[in-house]
Image (cartoon, grey):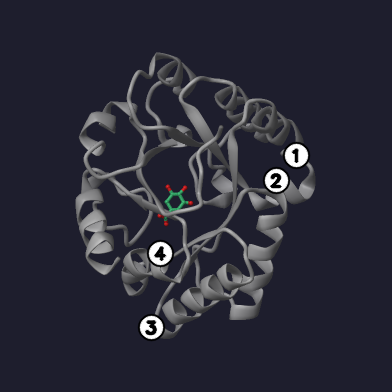
Amino acid sequence: MGLQFDSFVLTAATADLADEPAARDHADAVEFRMDLAETDPLEALREYDGELPILATNRAAWEGGEWEGDDDERLAELAAAARLEGVEAIDIELESCRSGAAETVLEAAADNDVSVVASAHDFEGTPSESEMVETLTAACEYADVGKLAVTAHEQGDALAVLSATHQLTTAGETVATMAMGEAGSHTRAVAPLYGSRIGYAPVDPADATAPGQYDLETLSTLIEALE
Ligand SMILES: O=C1C[C@@](O)(C(=O)O)C[C@@H](O)[C@@H]1O
């Protein structure tokens, strides 16, 4: 059975699986950013003998990641990751689902009981609430979890993300949301109260994988205090 998202999953977001032991006390899973890894990510996954389940992400440069190469190759690596032990979920861009490019990856996930997160990012700003609802609804059609990370410039942006999260959750969908940037940081602690099912935080704040992330221990403490 793949990673379950029926309750909140706090992931330690990292480019290095050696972080896993340090994450165990606070995280429920590890998000392995294959695109940010300094050594062969598939080799690292094959050698992984940690305790936490892995959510594998191989983010394209066109979606804010660091995979600069061929997109088919990127998706083939992600499909290969889905077939490896320890990988219980994968993250795939909504855009790749929409274009059909993700088909093999989605098949590999289904064949191996690996859960799927379909994600969209906006590194510039926060779309209107109705656009966010549309994006999340579309993402939920392809995956177990629809995820949206936007960039907040003001409190109103953060509120709109939380409201979209609440709408989808009350409609029975499983979503993960967060607002990147300083004005959005608090959404990482608060969004779970509105239904968001995944949080991302680096073990060491210096290794943040997105703007405005809290470190893992801080986010875990904040979420527990609010629960
Ligand atoms: O898509 C996401 C969310 C994220 O961008 C964040 O804002 O925490 C962090 C990424 O590592 C992850 O893949």
Residue 143, visible in the rendered structure: yes
Kindly identify which numbered label has been placed on residue 161: none
Mark 1 vs 4, N-terminal side: 1
Residue appearing at x 46%, y 79% in the figure:
157
Q: Do the residues labelled 1 and 4 touch (CB within 8 Å)?
A: no
- Of labels 1 and 4, the one closer to you: 4
Secondary-structure class at tag 4: helix
Residue 13 location (% of width, % of height): 36, 43
Mark 2 vs 3, N-terminal side: 2
Kindly identify which numbered label has been placed on residue 192: 4
Residue 205 location (% of width, % of height): 22, 50
Circle 3: residue type: Gln
Circle 1: residue type: Ala
Residue, disc 3: 155
Secondary-structure class at tag 1: loop
Circle 2 packing at 10 Å, graded few (<14), some (14-19), many (20+), is: some
Q: Are marks 3 and 1 in contact (CB under 8 Å)?
A: no
Whether residue 174 sits left or right of residue 28 in the image: it is: right
Q: Are marks 2 and 4 in contact (CB under 8 Å)?
A: no
Residue, disc 2: 96
Secondary-structure class at tag 3: helix
Circle 2: residue type: Ser
Residue appearing at x 60%, y 42% in the figure:
116
Residue appearing at x 38%, y 83% in the figure:
155
Circle 1 packing at 10 Å, graded few (<14), some (14-19), many (20+), is: some
Kindly identify which numbered label has been placed on residue 101: 1
- Of labels 2 and 4, the one closer to you: 4
Q: Quadrant of the N terminus?
A: top right
